[in-house]
Image: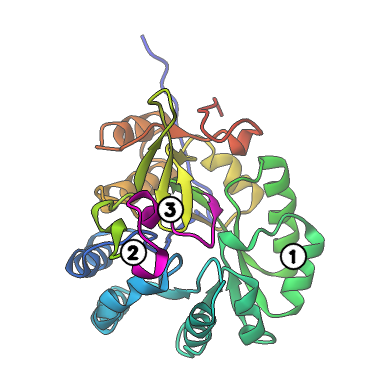
Amino acid sequence: MSQTHTYTSSPAAMKLTLGPVLFKWEPETFRDFYFRMADESPVETVVLGETICTKREAFVEPFYPEIIDRLTRAKKEIVFSTLAQVTTPKNRAHVEKACARENFPIEANDPAALWHLDGRAHRLGPFMNVYNEGALDFLHAKGATHLCLNPELPKTAARVLAARAKELGMGTDILGFGRFSLSLSARCYHARAVDRQRDACRFACDADPDGMPLTSLDGETFLTVNGVQVLSHSYLCLLQEIKELQDMGLGAIRLSPHSIDMCAVSQIFRDVIDGKVSPDEGEARLNAMPLKGPLSNGFYHKKPGCQKCAA
């Protein structure tokens, strides 16, 4: 007979944040995704805005007013992200435009955004690479009010930063689901893969709504390409670690959008946080979905990121 465990949530149960879409999706798919997340998902905060490639946003930007209206009516908090890498005058102009939004919190993902946000309340995204208390203190003094921890941090570092953020009165979240970013480049991997230049890419990334699989010479899939970004092949999953993350004082779990049923993913995390299902059952439900890679949590446990470790 299997042993029965009871999972209970704390009085201040963690919230759920939906990160920005990192991939090139068809505009209508993008719009309908956010409509459904507004109407059917338990996420409390939704991050909009282009984070990877400025050329992509022109296709979906016309839908922003409708998306914002739908999310607002669903009482979701809306945050706008900035680019994760700024290398050209066009990138700088894009960041300036993003930071000029006054009606929504801005999430900085590159130091270029801090130039425009200095002294103004803003959030720090996972691409800002805040690794120690000194960096956090400096950025807080410049106006940062919220930190999303970098997914490559081990739990020892996450615990220290979460404690320091609490002392500073900052909000915190951590990526709990999705392919995690490993590097960014000035070159576009997608364009290069089809022998095109970045400025004449003809949107080679169109065909890969979850990124393009990258295989080794032995034919093993081990990374994912997304324009200028390299992501993991595996999907980070911190369901087993939720109780520990709550005990650290982290306020929210972030879910990174993929082309699977993200309403179902968010409900799985909500159910585990609320103690309705066990982490094991939550993982079983995730594994039953059409993921394009295995689950992993290695970085959190100070192991290679692609590994799946026991909590």
Q: Earlier in the sequence, mark 1 or mark 3?
A: 1
Q: CA distance from mark 1 to mark 3?
A: 32 Å
The tally of labels here is 3
x%, y% of residue 199?
Answer: 39, 70
Pointer 2 residue: 201
Q: Residues within 10 Å of mark 3 (few under 14, many from 20)?
A: many
Q: CA distance from mark 2 to mark 3?
A: 10 Å
Pointer 1 residue: 136
Q: Quadrant of the N terminus?
A: top left
Residue at image position (69%, 87%) is 119
x%, y% of residue 57?
Answer: 34, 74
Residue 42 occupies quadrant: bottom left
**Label 2 is placed on what type of residue?**
Cys
Is residue 69 part of the magenta span, yes or no?
Answer: no
Q: Are marks 1 and 2 in contact (CB under 8 Å)?
A: no
Q: Residues within 10 Å of mark 1 (few under 14, many from 20)?
A: many
Taking 63 as reference, is 13 left or right?
right
Q: Is residue 18 above or below residue 224?
A: below
Provide the secondary structure element on which disc 3 rests: helix
Q: Quadrant of the C terminus?
A: top right
**Label 3 is placed on what type of residue?**
Tyr
Provide the secondary structure element on which disc 1 rests: helix
x%, y% of residue 41?
Answer: 29, 58
Give the number of the mark in front: 1 or 3: 3
